Image (tube, rainbow, N blue to C red):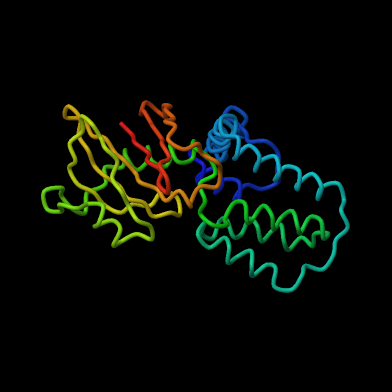
Amino acid sequence: MICSDFKEWLLERGGGGRPEGPERGCGPERGGEAERGGEAASHAGSCASCRALLELDDALERAMAEGMREVEVPQGLEKKVEMNLEPFGDGGAAGLRRLVTRGMAPLAVAAAILLVFMLTGRGDFRSMDEIGSLAVKSHNEGLAAEFAAADVPEPAAWFTERLDFPVKLASMEGLKLLGGRKCNLGKNEVAYLFYERDGRPVSTFIIDAGDLGFEMAEDRPYSFSIGGNGVSLKKDGSLVYATVD
């Protein structure tokens, strides 16, 4: 499970409480839900930003369960929630609508709105783990290139014409450029370059540093592994380079 999947699970779950592992299911009919709960628990254990979201959601549920007085739902609030949940489909919208239409006290309403915008606001990346997870997912999807390197002598210009930020290719020693395409990591469009090293595919994603929702040191390489894939991240000026092999 990656950060975007966790947020979708958090919006769809009901009743609060910590995620359940598969062994805590209550019969065959709950197998799928319990399995997702186990994956969510594992992800929250390793991702600080998603763990904070889970703790906020749990705190909101506890406050509501402790008997906060009911008040009339502010006019237009349910519609605003639905608009912000459109990217998550009907399941996510239904989950938040249930919270809003319970008739929450003002403090709970404010907490719910805060949670909505933390989950569905602008598409800022909230951690290096999130960038790495999304990059690995795209790397393993086997996406096709939109252009071959032999046909586009200036790949940076090709991307700059099609994205909302200027693109500059990094020096990639020992790698052969095969082609590229536009790609979405979460809600953000990025440049996706296909390389090859000793017959093995290597992917590099070029990200607008303005889409970062956290601080990242300049010119400092970060390396880690996700699911058997090596990931390296580096910020250089207005760009972030995420490479997966």
Q: Residue furthest left?
A: 150
Q: Please report the residue visible at 44 percent of the width from the left and 32 percent of the height from the top.
A: 220
Quarter of the rendering occupied by the C terminus: top left
Q: Quadrant of residue 140?
A: top left
Q: Quadrant of residue 24?
A: top right
Q: Position of residue 214 (x, y in %)?
A: 56, 43
Q: Please report the residue visible at 42 percent of the width from the left and 42 percent of the height from the top.
A: 134
Q: Nearer the viewer, residue 104 or 52?
A: 52
In the image, is residue 74 above or below residue 116? below
Q: Position of residue 201 (x, y in %)?
A: 23, 34
In the image, is residue 85 above or below residue 42? below
Q: Position of residue 13 (x, y in %)?
A: 62, 47
Q: Nearer the viewer, residue 53 or 123?
A: 123
Q: Position of residue 176 (x, y in %)?
A: 17, 36
Q: Is residue 84 left or right of residue 56?
A: left
**Label tally:** 0
Q: Is residue 217 left or right of residue 81?
A: left
Q: Residue furthest bottom?
A: 75
